Image: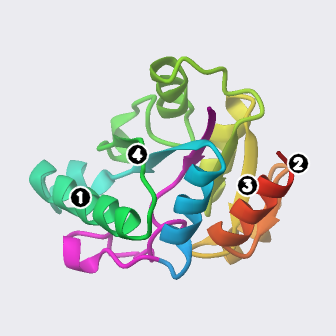
Amino acid sequence: MKLIILDRDGVINQDSDQFIKTPDEWKPIPGSPEAIARLNQWGYRVVVATNQSGVGRGLFGMDTLNAIHERMLRTVAQAGGRIDAIFFCPHTAEDGCDCRKPKPGMYREIGVRCHTDLAGIPIVGDSLRDLEAAVEVGAQPILVLTGKGEKTRIDPALPAHTRIFPDLAAAAIHLAAST
């Protein structure tokens, strides 16, 4: 089975500068749940890797984060798909952990847990930190223009071999065609 790693906010669901703090604030980007279902049908294991510093900032607790993720899993299941695992970093930037993107610790942990070398694995994000962490582990960075993607696209630090797509649905179609 193939592996794909997706960021959450801005890739699967609408992003917010005020954080997604409740299940009601979690709103899927149109076409993303269906894109995950298609990825599953094409043999991909879908794993989510998301920075969730709202936990570390005290904006919401683990029960709320779990409820938000339950809503995401339900929404994807209603579209006929599944997310195989969710990895998250609850730390703030000031904590200096290795799991908060752009550091590669969370991706490395996914590789270990999935018994997979991440070289060439597609990692889809909407921010520079997602792509920088992907490059660190030898994965294929994919930028979607949803969420912070439009702003990220013009960043001079954008990794040179980043593939760019309008949204997760378009990225999924490209991945299916190239496998």
Q: Is 61 left or right of 122, judged from the image as shown?
A: left
Between 165 and 157, the one nearer to me in the picture: 165
Relative to 154, say whether 60 is above or below. above
Q: Does the magenta stretch include residue 57?
A: no
Q: Give the number of marks.
A: 4
Do tag 1 and tag 2 residues touch (Cβ < 8 Å)? no
Magenta range is 1-28
Residue wearing tag 4:
93
User: Could you tell me the amino acid type at mark 4?
Assistant: Ala
Q: Are marks 4 and 1 in contact (CB under 8 Å)?
A: no
As shown in the figure, which amino acid type bears the numbered disc 3?
Ile
Mark earlier in primary sequence (1, 3): 1
Look at discs 4 and 3 and give the one toward the viewer. Answer: 3
Q: How far apart are marks 3 and 2 (CA)?
A: 9 Å
Q: In which quarter of the image is the N terminus?
A: top right
| Quadrant where the C terminus is found in the figure | top right
Please state the horizontal and vertical placement of residue 138, each as a whole percent of the image: 75, 29
Q: Could you give the CA–CA distance between mark 1 and mark 3, rounded to whole angstroms?
A: 25 Å
Mark 1: few/some/many CA within 10 Å (<14, 14-19, 20+): few
Pointer 3 or 2: first along the chain: 3
**Residue toward you, 111 or 43:** 43
Q: Earlier in the sequence, mark 4 or mark 3?
A: 4
The span from disc 2 to disc 4 (Cα, nearest Å) is: 27 Å
Q: Position of residue 4 (x, y in %)?
A: 61, 43
At a point 61% along the width and 76% down the height, the residue shown is 146
Residue found at x 50% / y 24%: 114
Residue tagged 2: 161
4 or 1: tag closer to the N-terminus? 1
Which secondary structure type mostly characterizes the magenta part of the structure? loop
